[in-house]
Image (cartoon, helix red, strand yellow):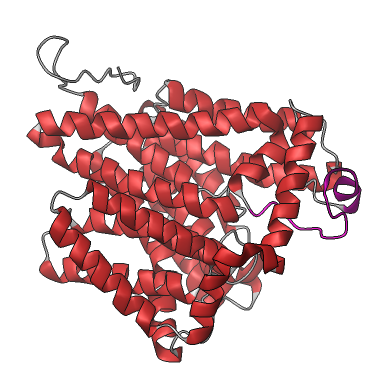
Amino acid sequence: MRDIAITLIIFGTIPLILKYPWTGVLVFSWVSMFNPHRFAWGFAYDFPFVMIVAVTTLVSMLLHWKEVRLPINSITILLMLLPIWMTVTLFFALEPSAAHEKWEGVMKAFFFILVAASLVHSRKQLEALLWVLVLSVGFYGIKGGIFTILVGGEHRVYGPPGISYLSDNNGISVALIMIIPLMHFLSTTVSSKWMKWGMYGAMFLSGIAVLGSQSRGAFLAILVMIMFLWLKSKKKVLSGMVLLLAGALSISFMPEQWTSRMSSIWNYEQDGSAQGRMNTWHMAFNLANDRPLVGGGFEPYDRTAFAKYAPDPTDIHSAHSIYFQILGEHGYVGFGLFLALGIACWMVSRRLIHASRARPDLVWAGDLARASQVSLVGFAVGGAFVNIAYWELPYYEIVVLMAAHRLASVGAPKWGQGKVELKPTGVVT
């Protein structure tokens, strides 16, 4: 019954996608991030829903080709250069078979990120995409928060079933950290008090779920994110008191085993998990130094690579860090492109915030940019301990920021008539 229901829901969106191609981005992101088919137990579990939605969207783009507009700017160029370079490193991969399998999935993700950038143009569309992203990940935050409260924090929170970037406790915790600021932004876009309080409740439960994941990397990320959020707030005294009170109450609720696990952050020399991560980071760093241009290609984490590059060749792990994942797999060139993309995105958000101060009609865009900055700080810090460099959410956030930037460029003051000029091409000056 569950298989049939999921199949009917997804196939029921096909006529809508064929009429409005941008809705294909919504359905694709929902299926790929929420993984509804993984809640089935029959034929739907492995059914290629993502491929069907993707093909339908491409057909709709051909039928409505005038609606397809990919902005050419520094961000989209980087969004193309990064997967292109990953393809180059594929030819030099240490483990060709595993690398090719990973390459296929990553290329599909980046291709559809560019599809999203070509179709999401209006405020209605970008907010709809944000709602899909928030609900897809936020479901696990609400579920995980309730679970943590019911069990008193004694058991860990995990992500969606099956194989996913978010399946383990570390992945889902960083995802929730990234989603919470976006929840706050969406709460400012609704007029219903019930919806606002619903979003506040989802934010609270998602925060509890982050603690319930017992992820030390996520704990560090949420501390940094809270500090950054406080720095961005206008009422620092009030917000500081609220954040401190909420944090103290939440932490006091957690059991002694949680406190003991978080305390081990400061004693990483004696922690086997932390030492395993550092061993892999050394391996990735040495690998990149030996092959600075191309790294080891996708998935170089095998006995041969660790025997050659790791301090402890017997302690084999994956990268457990977006930075060492990119550096070890794609060399310093790929690492540079990855950082450049983040910096370009950050600069766009800064210009949006600055523009919103001079134009009341862009207050929403400034709020969105601030929320995205906080979210990306969570990704930058939490991602330092998780393999989510290829996960779609931060790239969808970049797409949303680009769409907001294009909207902000319409009617922007000319040079000399205002404080900010936003060029229609998407390049910020």
- 312 above or below 356? below
Write down the region rendered in magenta.
Answer: 303-320
The number of numbered discs placed on residues in the rendered structure image is 0
Screen quadrant of the C terminus: top left
Most prominent secondary structure in the magenta stretch? Answer: loop
Please give the name of the residue rendered at 52% of the width and 26% of the height, measured from the top-left corner: 78
Q: Give 54 or 379, whichever is nearer the viewer.
A: 379
x, y percentage for residue 357? Answer: 13, 33
Q: Give 76 or 50, whichever is nearer the viewer.
A: 76
Task: Confirm whether residue 118 shows in the render.
Answer: no
- State yes or no: residue 245 in magenta: no
Please give the name of the residue rendered at 50% of the width and 79% of the height, measured from the top-left corner: 258
Q: Give 193 or 67, whichever is nearer the viewer.
A: 193
Please give the name of the residue rendered at 34% of the width and 49% of the height, measured from the top-left corner: 374
Q: Quadrant of residue 179?
A: bottom left
Please give the name of the residue rendered at 56% of the width and 37% of the height, measured from the top-left corner: 111
x, y percentage for residue 148? Answer: 43, 83
Q: Quadrant of residue 276?
A: bottom right
Outermost residue on the bottom side: it is 151
- 49 above or below 362? below
Q: Please indicate whether residue 275 sits to the left or right of residue 264 in the image.
A: right
x, y percentage for residue 71? Answer: 40, 24
